Amino acid sequence: MSSSEISTFTQEDGDGRIATNREPDWYKDAIFYEVYVRGFADGNADGIGDFIGLTEKLPYIKELGVNCIWLLPMYPSPLRDDGYDIADYYNIHPDMGTLGDFEEFLRQAHELDIRVVVDLVVNHTSSECEWFKAARQDPNSPYRDYYVWSDDPTRYSDARIIFLDTETSNWTFDPVAGQHYWHRFFSHQPDLNFENPKVHEELLKVADFWLEKGLDGFRVDAIPYLYEEEGTNCENLPKTHEFCKKLREHVDRKFPGTLLLAEANQWPEDVVEYFGKEGDEFHMCFNFPLMPRMFMSVRREDRKPVEDIILNLPKIPPNAQWCQFLRNHDELSLEMVTDEERDYMYTEYARDPRMKINLGIRRRLFPLMENNRRAIEILHSLLLTLPGSPILYYGDEIGMGDNIYLGDRNGVRTPMQWTGDRNAGFSRSDPSRLYCPVIADPVYGFQGVNVESASRHESSFLNWLKRLIRIRKRYIAFARGEVHFLHPANHRVITYLCIHGDEIMLVINNLSRFSQYVEIDMRDFAGYTPIDVFSSNPFPQIGELPYLVTCGPHGFYWFKLEKG
Ligand code: GLC
Ligand code: CA
């Protein structure tokens, strides 16, 4: 698919339906990049990243090989949960710019054939939202019923508390309203009441507002928690799925080609439900079950965690796609692993108790892996070849560090490091004005770790990753193929085929820090020649005997199998 074939223009046709002529399943071939606008680039020198700054950096994102940006919430908000506490759904946070700045950013992104999806928080609002203010002040206000109130704070007691480190209950008493309100996250984030049809209407209106601007989709936040029901854990309820279908039907009808990506941090059998049995809910779901298991496999030098979880993922509808990631703006969440697996992860990856938060580890990729370049490379080989579309987290492409002395998850949201200059080139403001200090330690500090120096060094991780992305995009089997695991005796090596039509890719990843060899039963492909896609070098032809491959420490191969 060439970029000129995709147009992101939308036009009204006679029926008022908005027609698009873009590829409907573009997300299957996408490489995503998650951007924290406040932390990316400061265009007006006030110490806070904004849309003007981000727009200036679009060529950098383009060059990385990314074709879809996911923006963290950019709405007006008291920022007590970094924007996931929305106060006004119809505007841009003044720190980040104006609606005009956002529209200009979107226009320029589209010009570069980069799509843009933003976070849509539907489960809850900020307590500063006008809807909540009206609700608490007046029991007769139409907004009262936008939220979930009760005189009895013992209702729904089977629902777990998610922010374990800060909250003791899912109910908080509001002295103004004289009642308790329900919240699954921080107590300043009251949950919306989905039993009220007006809430549905309101949220669809919000979606329309942004999609009319030409936005390409939403990452829908915290989707499992929309409804409550006594006697259940209040997650993944049938009514929640009904709302998802309604949202999908709405955007499909009015804005075909719009991507809906679900944040459903759940066990495999529950996540896949969000694709909808008929492929009629979300196009994509984050692969939360896979994420921690990639780290387990690499640390244990054993393919079992990754292989088992993928084999256990139920089949997904043909129009659906997984979205896999190594790190994001949150902690490395360990909610969907066994107690034993969690203990293992804490011991291996969070030696300092400060690294833990709730049920997870708040660290960036490079420090998690102790800066071990080879181990990080093997993780990226998995990320870019396992079934689904990959997502990268800003700053990880240059090996940024974190700051575990900052509160909450702020340590992984520090300013992007562009240069070795003042404020890492992120901002021309007075350094004391920055929304958050830059990383300045001797290992990950901006003086050494920054885009400018990484771009200059041919062997930098950044240049290595760009090349990997370029090659991944060349083979459709990585994006859309079916994965078949091969089971050579050596369990330190994970080997699989990605097959799409007559494109057959063979991937061999050595999870071990030592050299390994594997003997792979490839009889089905006797007569084929594996071509190493990085060098175009042909390897010996496959025959009837086990195919022998040796791998250096954390080495990997991506082969294309060619006949003859
Ligand atoms: C999601 C976000 C997280 C936020 C939470 C509550 O899990 O990823 O950052 O704190 O929702 O909105
Ligand atoms: Ca700014």
Image (spheres, rainbow, N blue to C red):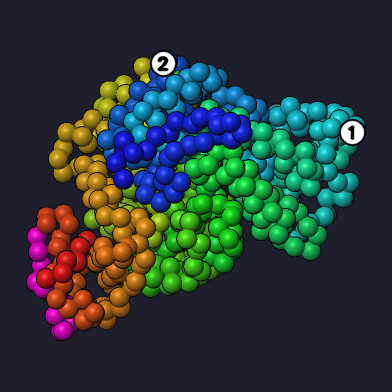
Residue 65: x %, y % from top left: 29, 41
Depicted 194 relative to depicted 297: above or below: above
In the rendered structure, does residue 549 fall within the stretch colored magenta?
A: yes
Q: Nearer the viewer, residue 326 or 207?
A: 207
Q: Which residues are magenta?
A: 537-552
Quadrant in which the C terminus appears: bottom left
Front tag of 2 and 1: 1
Q: Quadrant of residue 537?
A: bottom left
In this rendering, the answer to whether 498 lies above or below 451 is: below
Q: Position of residue 47 (x, y in %)?
A: 44, 20
**Mark 2 neighbour density, 10 Å: few (under 14) some (14–19) many (20 or more):** some
Q: Is residue 441 left or right of residue 146?
A: left
Q: Amino acid at mark 2?
A: Ala
Q: Residue at x 59, y 35 (%)?
A: 17
Question: Which residue matches tag 1?
Answer: 139
Task: Estimate the x, y position of residue 468 in percent, counting from the top left.
Answer: 24, 49
As helix, strand or loop, the secondary structure at mark 2 comes to loop
Q: Is residue 293 magenta?
A: no
Of the numbered discs in the image, which one, if any, rests on residue 45?
A: 2
